[in-house]
Image (cartoon, rainbow, N blue to C red):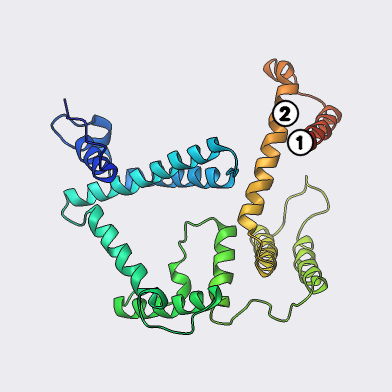
Amino acid sequence: MKKTPDLQNPIEALLQVAKDLRDPNGGCPWDLKQTHQSMAKHLVEETYEAIDAIYKLQEEDERTWGNLKEELGDVLFQVIFQAQLASEKNKFTFQDIAKYMTEKLIFRHPHVYGDLQGVDSAEQVLQNWEKLKRTEREKKGLEKSMLDSIPNSMPALLKALRMGQKVSRVHFDWQKEIHTKQDIEKKIQEELTEWLKLLPTNFTEEVSNVEKAEEELGDLLFAISQMARKYGLDPERALQKSNEKFRTRFRFMEKKFKDKLEKDELPSTEEWEAAWEEAKKEETKNRE
């Protein structure tokens, strides 16, 4: 049996746990089978759970803060476990990761750790950040575009937002001629019209050109994401909120129709619609 790590130094203790789990002599059979690739999905899952916890934070609700602490701990262990796997191959350690990140942040904050003057706003910080990233890319001979640092696996709506943010830092602000709400309405209506032209009259009919229809739908969603950015809104977070609202309302309806659904008796369209309105009223009441 392994000796329980001393919690006086929590980081060292967690590093020791990862090492113990991976020890062929007395370690965990499941952990011993894992690889960088097999653990990737767990990193994604834990990250999304941490994001959910962040969105659910309530200043006066200690339970939400406790939940966030736990979810961030799960993300931290995923990093530590990946570092343990790499250290077994003599590639790098957790300390190497921390050292790299410290050096990187110091380099990218010359207005804090150096003598760079004239960086007095968040916008100036981001512009200088991009200059320093270009310098790093040139030294490494890796990324040819400032957009290459945006992961392909990032959710599409969030990716659209990040691309707009990045290019705006070098003064290429998408649709710069748009200045008013009326301009926004006109642009979105244009994109919506282009998409609708490709759709059949009824849902039962097939879309004749799926690829083109998806392209136009993408243009519409991209336009909406950039308009949201101009107002300082996060479209990814907005959609997350709508998803959660839908989930809450549907759960309310599931409870209402529990007996029917368990008997495979599907409610009628009218019953669903009435229950939806009831769920909306319940939601409003809970907010008050």
Task: Work out which quarter of the rendered image holds the N terminus and state it.
Answer: top left
Label 1 Cα neighbours within 10 Å, binned few <14 / some 14-19 / many ≥20: some
Question: Which residue is farthest left?
Answer: 25
Q: Secondary structure at mark 1?
A: helix
259 with respect to 89 (left or right): right
The residue pinned by badge 2 equals: 252
Find the distance from the CA under tag 2 to the CA under tag 1: 10 Å
Residue at the image position 76 percent from the left and 36 percent from the top: 283
Q: Nearer the viewer, residue 271 or 45?
A: 45
Q: Secondary structure at mark 2?
A: helix
Residue at the image position 55 percent from the left and 66 percent from the top: 162
Estimate the x, y position of residue 273 in percent, counting from the top left.
83, 33
- Circles 2, 1 touching at the beta carbon (< 8 Å): yes
40 with respect to 186 (left or right): left
Task: Work out which quarter of the rendered image holds the C terminus and state it.
Answer: top right
Query: Is residue 256 positioned above or below 196 on the image?
Result: above
> The residue under label 1 is which amino acid type?
Glu
Tell which circle, 2 or 1, labels the residue nearer the N-terminal end: 2
Q: Nearer the viewer, mark 2 or mark 1?
A: 1
Residue 283, disc: 1
40 with respect to 68 (left or right): left
Estimate the x, y position of residue 205 in percent, counting from the top left.
77, 48
Query: Is residue 115 positioned above or below 239 on the image?
Result: below
113 with respect to 25 (left or right): right
